[in-house]
C-alpha cells in the first residue's frame, strides 16, 4: 500500500490502527472512507485527507529496470541540480518553460 494523509488523520488514528485497516482491506476507496470515518468518530477537528493506492508486486519494476530508468533520466536532464532553487531562465542549456495554453 501507499498512503498519503494529512495530520487530520494522524492526530486521531495511530500508525498501528492505520496499518490494521490497510492489512484487513483490499479496496483503496473503502480504506480511505474507513480511515476518515475513524478520525471523525474521534473528534475530527481538522481537515482529514487520505489518499491510498494498492500496489501489486507484479506491477513493480525490477531493480535492473529501475536503474536503467534512473540512468535514462539523468542522461535526458543533464546538469540540473538535485536540491535548492533552480533558475530556469539562466540554465546553461537554455531550457524554457512551456507557457502556451493547452
Image: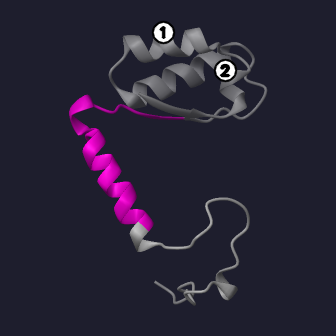
Image quadrant for the N terminus?
top left
Q: Is residue 30 above or below residue 93?
A: above
Tell which of 7 and 78 is nearer to you: 78
Q: Which-is-in-front pick, marks 2 and 1?
A: 1
The magenta-colored residue range is 51-74
The crowding category of the residue bearing disc 1, from other C-alpha atoms within 10 Å (few below 14, some 14 to 19, many at least 20), is few
Q: Quadrant of residue 71?
A: bottom left
Q: Is residue 58 above or below residue 12?
A: below
Q: Secondary structure at mark 2?
A: helix
Answer above or below: position of 13 versus 82. Answer: above
Return the residue found at the far right: 45
Q: Residue 62 at x, y = what percent?
A: 25, 40
Residue 61 seen anywhere in this rendered image of the structure: no
What SS does tag 1 mark?
helix
Give the residue drawn at x 44%, y 18%. 22
Residue under circle 1? Answer: 20
Residue shown at the point (45%, 23%) measured from the top left: 31
Please indicate, yes or no, whether residue 29 appears anywhere in the rendered image: yes
Q: How is the image coloured?
A: one colour
User: Pointer 2: residues within 10 angstroms few (<14), some, or many (20+)?
Assistant: some
Q: Position of residue 55 (x, y in %)?
A: 33, 33
The x and y percentages for residue 20 are 48, 9
Magenta residue check for 46: no
Badges 2 and 1: C-beta atoms under 8 Å apart?
Answer: no
Classify residue 7 by image quadrant. Answer: top right
Q: Is residue 45 left or right of residue 39?
A: right
Location of mark 2 (residue): 40
- What is the CA distance from the residue labelled 2 to the residue labelled 1? 17 Å
Q: Main secondary structure of the magenta part?
A: helix
In this rendering, would 28 be left or right of 41? left
Whether the magenta-drawn stretch holds residue 59 is answered as yes
Residue 71's mark? none
Amino acid at each position: 500500500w501507499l498512503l498519503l494523509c494529512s495530520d487530520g488523520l494522524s492526530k486521531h488514528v495511530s500508525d498501528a490502527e492505520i496499518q490494521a485497516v490497510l492489512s484487513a482491506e483490499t479496496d483503496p476507496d473503502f480504506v480511505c472512507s474507513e480511515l476518515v470515518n475513524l478520525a471523525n468518530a474521534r473528534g475530527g477537528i481538522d481537515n482529514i485527507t487520505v489518499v491510498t493506492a494498492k500496489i501489486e508486486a507484479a506491477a513493480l519494476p525490477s531493480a535492473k529496470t529501475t536503474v536503467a530508468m534512473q540512468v535514462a533520466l539523468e542522461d535526458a536532464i543533464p546538469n540540473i541540480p538535485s536540491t535548492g532553487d533552480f533558475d530556469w531562465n539562466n540554465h546553461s542549456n537554455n531550457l524554457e518553460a512551456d507557457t502556451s495554453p493547452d
